Each structure stands twice: as structure tokens, then as C-alpha cells.
Amino acid sequence: MIRFHEVGVRYGRRVVVEGFDAEVAAGEWVGLIGPNGAGKSSLLRTVVGIVPHTGTVDVGGAATRARTVAYLPQEPVLPDDMTALEYALLGRAPYVSYFGQESAVDLAIARDSLARLDLAGFADRHLGEMSGGERQRLVIARALTTQAPVLVLDEPTSALDIGHQQQALELVAELRRERGLTVLSAMHDLTLAGLYADRIAR
């Protein structure tokens, strides 16, 4: 479960979220909608713990969120000289010791995530050689590689064509059913939000 209580976010004097209260039940998919600048992305970042905020955000009582929450940001950092497999493996970072190395299990999970998003043939391709849509699918693959019980998605399909939008969201829906995932997503397309989310929050 994700529980927000009186959550507020401000940048300097600008208040972007104020007094937000909501609950996302375990296994539920909630879509956040609203105009640009309404604070959707800031609210998602409070779940991950990467933006200062007032109030409380409880993610199932987890003390650490690295293995609990997989986050897909709206503008991820994508190094051009990294391969798709190397990038997907970043999702396994919470499970690898500081001086450790990815295991065969980590590699298998990363390759499976790539395959589920039609990126198996891109494993050794550098990110700088991939299209915008391919790169966005790769970001989703990295999030899935974490195998966290909570997925936080910030406009996960904004750079995809309609076919790949549905493919990516169908995959999230399928994994949600398989693993009992909890999903919180900011979505700009009301039709897609209505198709996939259990309910909508503003």
C-alpha cells in the first residue's frame, strides 16, 4: 500500500503540491491525471524519496525503498555509450553488493525484461544508436528488471507510438497480475488511463 497524508512539495516559494491525501491499495493501479505543472511528477518523486516534502508518504512500511519501488522518470538519464543490457542491469543494483558483480540470475532477469519489450536483439546495441521509442521501452525494461512490488511510472508511454503504448501498458498489466504489483502512474492520455488503471486520482 502507498499512503499519502497531508503531502506538500514546494520549490522555493512555488508550491506545486499541497495537502495531498490518498491511498493506493496493494495490487491496485491508480492513474494520476492533471494538466502540466499540476505536481504529478513531484508527487511521484515523493514516493521514491528523491524530493523534499512535508507530510508523510508510507510505502508499505518499508524502511528502504530501493528494492520496494521501481521508478520510471519522465526524463531519464540515458548514456549513449552504454549498451541496452548494461542499462537494463542497472535495475538489479539494489541486489548487488558495492564491490559485487551481477549474477547469472541478474543477467537472466535483465534479458527477460528486454525480450518482453521486443528488445532482445538490442542487448549489445549502444543507447546512442537507438531511437527515442526504443530508448523509452528500454527504460520500462530497466524498471521491470528491479522486480520491485511497487511500480511508479511518470508518463511511461509519452514517446511511443500507439502500438507500442498499448504493448508497454499491457506488459505492465500482465506483470501486475502475475506478481501482484502496485502501480501508480502519471498519464496524459485519459483513454489509456481509463483502460488500464483501476481508478483515477487528480
Image (spheres, rainbow, N blue to C red):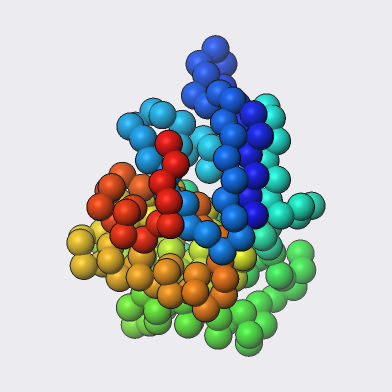
- Quarter of the picture holding the N terminus: bottom right
Residue at horizontal 28 percent and vertical 62 percent from the top: 165
* Image location (x, y in percent) of residue 34: 36, 35
- Residue toward you, 167 or 80: 167
Residue 38 appears in the rendering: yes
* Image location (x, y in percent) of residue 124: 41, 78
- Quarter of the picture holding the C terminus: top left
* Image location (x, y in percent) of residue 4: 63, 39
Residue at horizontal 52 percent and vertical 59 percent from the top: 28
Image: 149 above or below 32: below
Horizontal side, residue 31 vs residue 28: left or right: left
Residue at horizontal 51 percent and vertical 63 percent from the top: 143
Image: 58 above or below 139: above
Image: 59 above or below 84: above
- Residue toward you, 137 or 165: 165
Horizontal side, residue 33 vs residue 82: left or right: left
- Residue toward you, 4 or 16: 4
* Image location (x, y in percent) of residue 21: 59, 34
Which residue reaches farthest top? Answer: 13
Which residue reaches farthest right? Answer: 63
Horizontal side, residue 68 vs residue 17: left or right: right
